[in-house]
Image: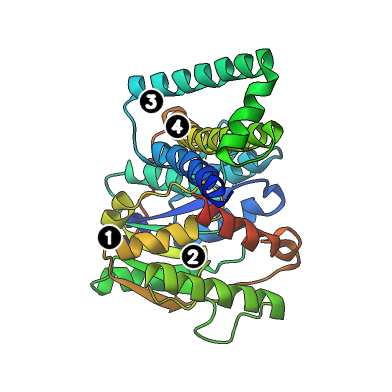
Amino acid sequence: MDTGKILIQIILIIGLAVPAVIILLPTKGARGLAIRRLTMLGILLGGIVAVMFPSLTDAIARTLGVGRGADLVLYGFLIVFVSYTLSTSAHLRRVDRQISELTRELAVARAEPPTAVTPDR
Amino acid sequence: MATPEIARGTWLVVPLYNEGPVIRSVVEHARRTFPNVVCVDDGSSDDSVAEAKAGGAHVVRHAINLGQGAALQTGIRYALLDPGARWIVTFDADGQHRTEDALRMVERLAAEPLDIVIGSRFLDDRTKPGLLKRVVLRAAVIFQRITSGVRLTDAHNGLRAMTRETASRIRITQNRMAHASELVDQIASLELRFAEEPVHVIYTEYSRSKGQSLWNSVNILSELLFK
C-alpha cells in the first residue's frame, strides 16, 4: 500500500526531526528535563505493552504499512537511539566547556600573579 | 633588539605539553628578546614544568590535559592580569618559531593600526614543508576562505601577535586543534584589522618527530563540523 508507506515515512521523518529541533532549541531546564523523562516513561510503557500483546505491534505495523512488527520496533529503536546520541553529545560538549572553564580558573588561581620583568636600560 | 617598551609590554604565551627536552632552551632564548613568558602546562607527564621554570618562564598549570586551544586561552587570560601587558604573542614550545619574526610582528602592532598579526609560512619560500603537508595546508586555507571569508595564506600558524584589546575580545572555545580556525572565524566576526607577516618555521628533527601529524587535519575538520 503506497499510502501506508508514505505514512510510516512521515512518522519516521518527524521522529528524527523533532529530537533534532528539541536539541537545537535551548530549552529551559525544568521543562526540558520533564519532556525527557516523560518520553522515557512513554517508551518504557510502550515496551511493556508490546511485550504483553506481541500481536499488537504487528497490527500497528500493518496499518502503518511497515509489514512486520519487528520492523516497526526497529524503526522506533532507531529514533530513540539517534535522539539519545544527539542529546548526549550536546550535553557532553556543555560539560567539556565547563570543565575547561573550571580548569582555567584553577590554573590561574594557583599560579603566582604575573610580575612583569622590567628590562633595565 | 626590542625596545624597552616592547620588551616590557609583550607577553609570550606558550602552550606546553611534554616538551621537556627543549622547553628550557626555547624559553631562555625567547626571553633574551621578550622577558615575559608564560608557559601553560597542559598536564605534561614529563619534567616540562621544572624545565620551563628553570628557563625563567611563569608557569600556569592545567590540572588535566585540555588541549592546545584551551592552553592558549588560559595563557592569554593570565597575561592580561598584568595591566602592563600591551601585546600578546602566541608562540610554540617546540622551538619552531623565531623570536625575530615575533618581534617584527609586535613592532607592526606598535606602529600600524592593526589588531592582530598572523604569521605565514607561505609569503616567502624560506620554510620548506613536505609536499603532502603543503597540499593539506593549502586545502585548509581554501576551506578557511570559504567558511570565514578571511583571506589568509597560512591557516594553521601558531605564531600570532595581538593587541591587549584583541586578546581580551577573542574567546577560544575549541580546546584541541580547531582553535586556529576558530580564531580566524573571530577575526571575521569581530571585524579585526589583521595582517600577515612572513615567518620562517624551523622544522627540526625534534619538531618533525612529534609535530603535527597530518592525521590531525582530519581531526580538525571533524572538530569544526561537529562543534
State the image coordinates of residue B202 (x, y, percent, origin top left). 63, 72
* Mark closer to the chain start, 3 or 4: 3
Q: Nearer the viewer, mark 2 or mark 1?
A: 1
Same subunit, labels 4 and 2: the answer reads no
The image quadrant that residue B63 belongs to is top right
The residue labelled by disc 3 is A32
The chain letter under disc 4 is A
Residue underneath mark 4: A98
Q: Chain of mark 3?
A: A
- Kindly report the distance in space between the C-alpha atoms of the residues bearing marks 4 and 2: 27 Å
Seen as rendered, the residue at the extreme front is A1
Q: Secondary structure at mark 3?
A: helix
Residue that label 2 marks? B159
Q: Quadrant of residue B81?
A: top left
Measured in 3D between alpha carbons, the distance from the residue under mark 3 to the one under mark 2, in whole angstroms, is 43 Å
Q: How many neighbours does mark 1 have within 10 angstroms: few (below 14), some (14-19), or many (20 or more)?
A: few
Name above or below for residue A21 compared with residue B24: above
For the residues labelled 1 and 4, the Cα–Cα distance comes to 24 Å
Gap in Å between the C-alphas at discs 3 and 4?
A: 20 Å
> Residue at (59%, 84%) from the top-left corner?
B126
Amino acid type, label 4: Gln
Quadrant housing the C terminus of chain A: bottom left
- What's under tag 2, amino acid-wise? Leu
Front position among marks 4 and 2: 4
Nearer the N terminus, badge 2 or badge 1? Answer: 2
Three-letter code, disc 3? Gly
Q: Same subunit under labels 1 and 4?
A: no
SS type, badge 1: loop
Q: Which residue is mark 1?
A: B190
